[in-house]
Image (cartoon, helix red, strand yellow):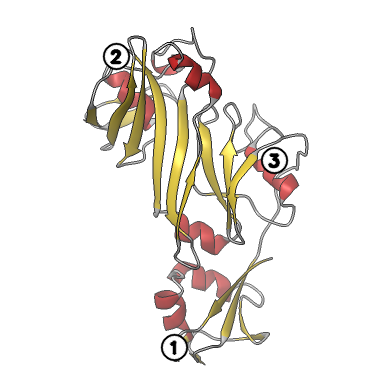
Amino acid sequence: MGKLVFCVTRDTKLDDFLRNDAGVSKRMISRLKRTENGITRDGRLVRTIDNVYRGEKIVLSFEDTKILEPNGNLDVEIAFENENLIVFDKPVGMPVHPSIKHQGDTLGNFFAYKYPDLTFRPVNRLDRDTSGLCIVAKNAFSAAALQNDIQKVYYAAVTGNVKGEGTVDAPIAREQESIIKRVVREDGQRAVTHYKVLISGEKYSLLEVNLETGRTHQIRVHFSYIGHPLAGDDLYGGNREDIEYQALHCGSLEFKEPVTGELITVKSDIRADMKRLFEKV
């Protein structure tokens, strides 16, 4: 059972405080009402229509269900942690969730070992072969609060010589007869990618990438579309001559702490195999 404690800042109705001061969604309030002892004051149930007063403590309790097998043989670095969330620095080659081909070797399995009493709630999901920062919320409230409030910076090593900065604005759709691959197509969803060149080499260039939208495989598809596929990304035309995995790393996250509202920035250096692509530049 996950818990959050809020201190009432003004005299008002509980529903007003939860929605407008604590930032709890209407949907979440409905869920808490269905949870045993979901909303309490001084250890007793309190209704959303009741008055609450400045200085009182309101406790929200969330039911958590453990569904993943723990694996203590995995090792994932923790870049940041507090009582509401963890930011993992996910290694390349590790899936976030179990699948038919991956049972027991995922970030979820490591989380189940490290936090046996919590439910696995990843907020920003990374492809198996994308490394870097991944937020996992410790409770349902934090997961909901973080969904649309994260600024992400990616670092990509692309093939070829790229200069300056630019924007790719091209719609992305699923390729016909494929459940995985995406393509640029007129009937797709709008996708916008901004980039700035950090290192411009003859064979590879290192880019800082910011996403205006969040489509599946967006960075990989867009740079393949403009003729500069990611190094190591053979699905979208990149070669694996110098690197085994796609050269994509989530290197910075900026977000508001879901309870306090404090602005938090977490950073991660690009991985060693990406750095080696530029040793002779």
Q: Of the numbered discs in the image, which one, if any, rests on residue 161?
A: 2
- Occupied quadrant, residue 202: top left
- Occupied quadrant, residue 223: top left
Q: Give whichever of discs 1 and 2 has the lower sequence position.
A: 1
- Measured Cα–Cα span from mark 1 to mark 2: 58 Å
Residue 63 to residue 192: above or below: below
x then y, percent, for residue 159: 36, 14
Q: Of the numbered discs in the image, which one, if any, rests on residue 40?
A: none
- Measured Cα–Cα span from mark 3 to mark 2: 40 Å
Query: Alpha-carbon neighbours of circle 2 within 10 Å: few (<14), some, or many (≥20)?
Result: some
Q: What number of labels is visible?
A: 3
Residue 37 to residue 155: above or below: below
Q: Give whichever of discs 3 and 1 has the lower sequence position.
A: 1
Residue at the spot x=39%, y=55% of the render?
149
Query: Alpha-carbon neighbours of circle 1 within 10 Å: few (<14), some, or many (≥20)?
Result: few
Residue 68 to residue 250: above or below: below
Q: Of the numbered discs in the image, which one, if any, rests on residue 10?
A: 1
Screen quadrant of the C terminus: top left
Q: Secondary structure at mark 2?
A: loop
x then y, percent, for residue 222: 31, 26
- Measured Cα–Cα span from mark 3 to mark 1: 42 Å
Residue at the spot x=49%, y=47% of the render?
266
Residue at the spot x=28%, y=20% of the render?
225
Screen quadrant of the N terminus: bottom right
Camera-near label (1 vs 2) is 2
Residue at the spot x=44%, y=68% of the render?
25
Q: Which residue is mark 3?
A: 109
> Mark 1–mark 2 contact, CB under 8 Å?
no
